[in-house]
Image (tube, helix red, strand yellow):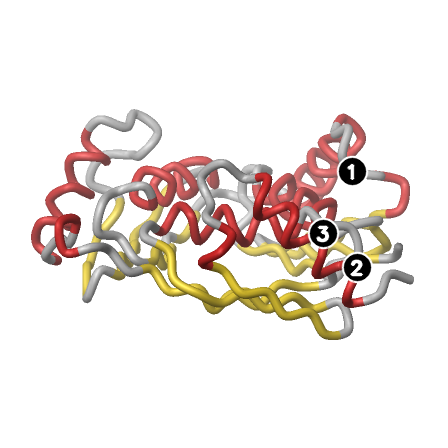
Amino acid sequence: MRTDLSIKEDVLEELEWQPSIDETQIGVVVKDGIVTLSGTVDSYTKKLEAEKAAKSVVGVKAVAEDIVVQYGTNHQKTDTEIATSVANAFKWNISVPENKVDVKVEDGWVYLTGEVLWDFEKNAAKKAVQNLLGVKYVVNNISIKQKVDTVDIKSKITKAFERAADIDAKNISVKADGHKVTLTGKVHSLKEKDEARKTAYYAPGVWTVDNELEVVY
C-alpha cells in the first residue's frame, strides 16, 4: 500500500517529466490515493496532459482536476472567433462527419452536440477542438446512433481486451445491455482502468460505458 506522500512525489516527478507542462504552475494534493490538481495553465491541452500524467502514477485511485485555463492577452479569442476555428477544423478533418455535429461556444467553453454513427467520430470531433487557441474546456455531448447487437458488442470488446498489451483481460467481465456496457472486475492501475473504458467505447453501437472496475495494487 503506497503512502500519499510517495504518490505525491511521483505525480510531481511525472509532471516535471512532461515537456509541455510547467510543473511549477500546478499544485498537487493527495489524500487516500485521490489526487487533486490545481493551478493555472495557458492551454486546454496542458490541462489534459497534467491529468493524464497524474493518472499514470501507480497508486492513484482517482484524479480531481481543478486546473484553470487562462490565456494571455495576446492569445485571447472571442467566442465567435473560436466557433469559426472549430468549423474550419471540422471541415478539414475527414473523421468528423459533415453536418452531423453542432457547436456552441460560451466564454471559451465549447459544447458539442449531434449524432454520429461511430465513437471514433465523436472522439475525433473533441480532438479537433481541444488544441484550438482560446478553448478553455470541451463538453462532448455528441451521441452515437447505431443498430445494436449485444452479443456482438460483448464479443468484440472481450477480444479487444485480449489483444491489448496494457489490459489484463482475464480479470475483466463485460456486460452489454442495449447500447450500454458495464465493466466489472479488477485492474492493476488507474491507467489500465481508463484503457479498458476507452477500448469498450471503440465497439460499434456503444453509447455509454459504466466502468465499475476496481483498482487493486
Of pointers 1 and 3, the one earlier in the residue sequence: 3
Quadrant, the C terminus: bottom right
Whether residue 91 sits left or right of residue 43 in the image: it is: left
| Residue 156, image x, y percentages | 69, 33
| Left or right of 19 in this view: 154 | right
Q: Position of residue 199 (x, y in %)?
A: 64, 39
The residue beneath circle 1 is 167
Q: Look at 74% across and 62% down and name the residue there.
A: 61
Q: Quick check: marks 3 and 2 in contact, CB under 8 Å?
A: yes
How would you rate the neighbour count of disc 1 (Cα within 10 Å): few for under 14, some for 14-19, many for 20 or more?
A: many
Mark before the other along the chain sequence, 1 or 2: 2
Task: Report the amino acid beneath label 2.
Answer: Ser
Q: Nearer the viewer, mark 1 or mark 3?
A: 3
> Who is closer to the viewer here, 191 or 168?
191
Q: Secondary structure at mark 2?
A: helix
Of badges 1 and 2, the one in the foreground is 2
Q: Amino acid under label 1?
A: Ile
Separation (CA) of disc 3 from disc 2: 6 Å
| Residue nearer the viewer, 118 or 94 | 94
Q: Which residue is drawn at the image coordinates 36% and 51% (left, top)? A: 44
Question: Could you tell me how far apart the alpha carbons at marks 1 and 2 are, in whole angstroms?
Answer: 25 Å
Element type where label 3 sits in the image: helix
Give the image location of residue 71, x and y in percent.
Answer: 24, 55
Nearest the eye: 125 or 159: 125
Give the labeled residue for mark 2. Answer: 6
Mark sitting on residue 197: none
